[in-house]
Amino acid sequence: MEYVANQKNAKITLAIIEAIHENAAYLSEIDGATGDGDHGVNMDKGFMLAKERIQEDMDFSESLKVLGRTLVMDIGGSMGPIYGTMFSRLSRSLKKQDQITKEAVLEALNNAIQGLMDLAGAKVGDKTLLDTLYPATESYKEALKQEKSFKECLKALLDGAEAGKENTKNLVAKIGRAARLGERSKGFLDAGATSCCIILKTMASSMCEDIINE
Amino acid sequence: MEYVANQKNAKITLAIIEAIHENAAYLSEIDGATGDGDHGVNMDKGFMLAKERIQEDMDFSESLKVLGRTLVMDIGGSMGPIYGTMFSRLSRSLKKQDQITKEAVLEALNNAIQGLMDLAGAKVGDKTLLDTLYPATESYKEALKQEKSFKECLKALLDGAEAGKENTKNLVAKIGRAARLGERSKGFLDAGATSCCIILKTMASSMCEDIINE
Amino acid sequence: MQRIINDPSLVVEDMLKGFERCHKDIIHIDEENPRVVISNFAKDKKKVGIVTGGGSGHKPAFIGYCGKNMVDAVAVGEIFSSPTAKSFYDCIRAVDQGMGVACLYGNYAGDNMNVKMAMELAEDDDIEVKTVVANDDVASAPKTEMQKRRGVAGEILMWKVGGAKANQGATLEEVIAAAQKAMDNTRSVGVGLGPCTIPANGKPNFSIAEGTMEFGIGHHGEPGIRVESLASAKEIADEMTSLVVNDIPYVEGDEVVVLISGLGATPVMEQYIFFDEVAKNLDELGIKIYKSYVGNYFTSLEMNGVTLTMMKVDEELKECMDEEVETMGMTQIRR
Amino acid sequence: MQRIINDPSLVVEDMLKGFERCHKDIIHIDEENPRVVISNFAKDKKKVGIVTGGGSGHKPAFIGYCGKNMVDAVAVGEIFSSPTAKSFYDCIRAVDQGMGVACLYGNYAGDNMNVKMAMELAEDDDIEVKTVVANDDVASAPKTEMQKRRGVAGEILMWKVGGAKANQGATLEEVIAAAQKAMDNTRSVGVGLGPCTIPANGKPNFSIAEGTMEFGIGHHGEPGIRVESLASAKEIADEMTSLVVNDIPYVEGDEVVVLISGLGATPVMEQYIFFDEVAKNLDELGIKIYKSYVGNYFTSLEMNGVTLTMMKVDEELKECMDEEVETMGMTQIRR
Ligand SMILES: Nc1ncnc2c1ncn2[C@@H]1O[C@H](COP(=O)(O)OP(=O)(O)O)[C@@H](O)[C@H]1O
Ligand SMILES: Nc1ncnc2c1ncn2[C@@H]1O[C@H](COP(=O)(O)OP(=O)(O)O)[C@@H](O)[C@H]1O
Ligand SMILES: [Mg+2]
Ligand SMILES: [Mg+2]
Ligand SMILES: [Mg+2]
Ligand SMILES: [Mg+2]
């Protein structure tokens, strides 16, 4: 059986935080084109705050919970509750398992999508981070259905995220600040979709390196 | 003896009013270069209001009083009291005489200058209407001293007014809105000096036509 | 960007310090959460607590309505960005006296989410929280989609009514009912003539071409109904009045409270000119003005423009509007 | 020019109509002179009348301070232009009850002339009129030429003190003495970051280059002391505080009222940031803030900038500042 250990595996979450930190300026730049240019700053603030509260020997699910809770409690805006909910949902799904299987990851992703839709009222196609998370999860699900290896499934997640993010260029923003631009928002990446892509890709790569085959 | 009749001679004042009305746009344009571009509007408003209150068969001095009083009472700003005082002083000096002699005109002009200096605190050279009124009066006084005819004296008034007004181009505004520009106010006519020049020139020409020689 | 600030990313922190210093006789900042402003009058007597919150940059809103007989605690967000769930939660905890808390806030995605999460936290503490969500902006969605409409300056009337009702000793249900009644009878619309700049951002949030105006703009610059040629005060007032009046609709014989707010850079002089045109329209329609407010009551940084808000009043709402109130943004002496 | 107006040459007329409609419970316009605004409280009791007046475009000044316990009648001029002598005179006549009238106005050429002429007219009616001429703007002339200094936002404190004193039943001499004391202890300075446009004129009155500010600007755009690079709120506050503090000077142990006013387009948020820096400076100097006001108290149309005003207070001035007041621009409940 293939799995990723949950115990003492906060390094995946720390890698995600690091990736957001490194890309903060880039994310703000993208937000600048159609929004108010602060997405990187907003994200970085919350993720760096969470970093201080996460020890490397925490469980992966516990570290996700801390990240999610920090975002919800201390960040505000829309990103706080949205990403907060995403990470909290991922955490809640995973905390049951010591050994995180590829099936468990799908369940967690689905739970996160459900949480986001319940909370934010954003739909697929509204040009938000959901337009990364949803196609990425679909792609993962497809790979899983084809009984691909954990690694290949994670690769599918990564590819799906990238494709979803890139596709936001073709979408018209229906929600958030960029909605002001209407049709003119076409041709630009969505900032939230971009950060979500960074998160999913980092998570996928980091988990790949950690797969145990017993 | 040369004189201008005071009785039933409001037409001089009406000519002044007419001249201001005709030049309103021009005066605003000049004010626009160094001030807020409303001098013509301000003047026209007051002078037209006075026009309604002046009958042609009024005494010249009485019509000046009505004009002065209208400006003081109904116009406000700085122009109301300043031109108001100027016309009131002219009126007060002239109302004693039925026959306005060239000496009486000098006295009236001097009285007006004194009134303006007492009231407004402007000095010669501050780039205001005083820089028309003062040199015009000096020029008139000089002609009178040389025992020139009434007509020649009035011609001197007219020339002095014109020269004074033109000379405001060389002055730096010390008072009023144009003072903001400091040195940059040089090279421009002063709006108040220009309106004063129109007033004095119109008065001089109009009186010239009216001189009686007995 | 011609602004009087220090670090652009700390404008909210810096502003709060000055605000607390200036209004220390009316409000104080929570000891543990610097993003929570609490009325000094909040616990003068046992009553329902009134909480609100929202992004910064709308001064006097939101903290300027914290004080006697109005809002008891305000959660403070970044510029144009919702406060944290924790701040809403801390507000709720700070003002609950066992009679429950009315959270009266505006319909924005972030605020909805953060209030929802704060309420879940409060539930664990057995604090009863009920909400009224302001949705007075007629231009933000058609009447068939009321739940999508944003809250704008009408929120002030909701706070005024809710705060007065709580002060009268009403139960949470009664406070919520009155605030909801206020909101149900309130409609607003805005017009934008010039944009604003979020300091940390440094460039205008959006643009409005010289000679045009955006009819129906939201108070963060959300898109309006249409971009039009800049019209006269009368024409703007006609258009705005008719949109607002026809939405409920207000009809002959109704009495209304009128609230005109400048969005920041519009001189108050113009707001009175605009108000006079609105009032003339109401005269013609036979709608009576019970009370009127004109001024910068709910701004959007230095945006150029105005909002028009009307609330139809009955005896209960009149009584609430007449209540004495003492806040930075509105001080009223009872006659 | 992005403005909400009708005929640009009638902005004052149009504004007055809206103002009277909105504040009919506090003020009314004289029946015969539409440029005279009179407090409804002016003759509630026999007292000294308080009159002021000035050009329009400074909302809330001047008419916004007409009301209970402050100014009894205001002469209204065109935008940035002195009212007529007749309007000042009509104000004086309207509020005289035999105890005389205190005309408390600002040091501008036009106002000086028009008040002077109004006083001559009042003399014929045997009305005793005395004046205090506000000259709080430190930047407008050196200390050796105090008589040349302009009046700016410090006028509000002069009205507050004069109005309170009159309400207490003081004689004309006492009212004048208190208002003069207020003025003698008051200093102001302004900074400009952006110009304003007189509507009838249509183009900015002056210009301030992006990245610069004009230190010491007057509130019609009169030239300041110098043009500087735009600095931080702290640096601006330091410079302004030290100019104001050193002029009287205010010294350790003094108590002062601080009034910050935005000039029109400066968000109130920034004014609080600025105020906090001023307050820190005063803390360091050991000067205590007795009371503080932050907001758009004395504006210049949509000019971008702020003024800083301080008044050193003794027991008499404190008592006057604490007095209840009800006007459009300042409403204060007595504690
Ligand atoms: N209501 C919403 N639901 C889901 N995602 C949203 C919503 N509003 C905005 N977003 C996402 O947020 C991103 C912008 O985030 P950020 O710049 O941090 O916040 P803000 O727009 O408040 O400045 C957008 O690119 C979009 O993906
Ligand atoms: N204090 C003063 N004393 C004398 N003349 C003055 C004074 N202030 C301004 N002026 C004159 O007024 C003229 C401008 O008048 P006007 O444009 O009508 O008034 P405003 O400057 O208020 O717009 C100037 O050109 C100058 O001649
Ligand atoms: Mg933002
Ligand atoms: Mg953003
Ligand atoms: Mg002018
Ligand atoms: Mg002018």
Image: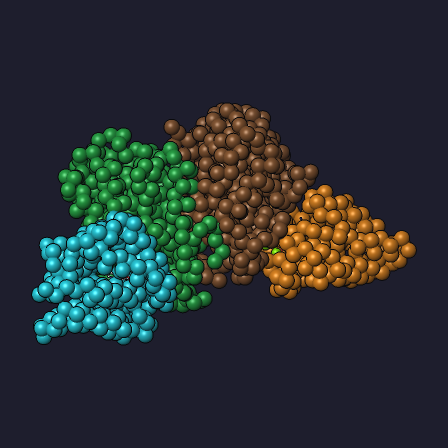
Chain colours: A orange, B cyan, C brown, D green
Q: Residue at x 53, y 59 (%)?
A: C210
- x then y, percent, for residue D284: 32, 55
Residue D334 lies in quadrant: top left
- Give the farthest residue toward the front: B214
Q: Is residue D154 left or right of residue C34?
A: left
- x then y, percent, for residue A211: 81, 59
- Residue C167 appears in view: yes
- Placement of the C terminus of chain D among the 4 image quadrants: top left
- Residue C31 appears in view: no
Q: Nearer the viewer, residue C157 or A210?
A: C157
Q: Nearer the viewer, residue A80 or A90?
A: A80
In the rendered image of this protein, does residue B161 appear above or below residue C134? below
- x then y, percent, for residue A99: 80, 51
Q: Residue at x 61, y 34 (%)?
A: C248
Q: Nearer the viewer, residue A95 or B173?
A: B173
Q: How many marks?
A: 0
Q: Residue at x 23, y 39 (%)?
A: D93
In the rendered image of this protein, does residue C45 appear above or below residue D86? above
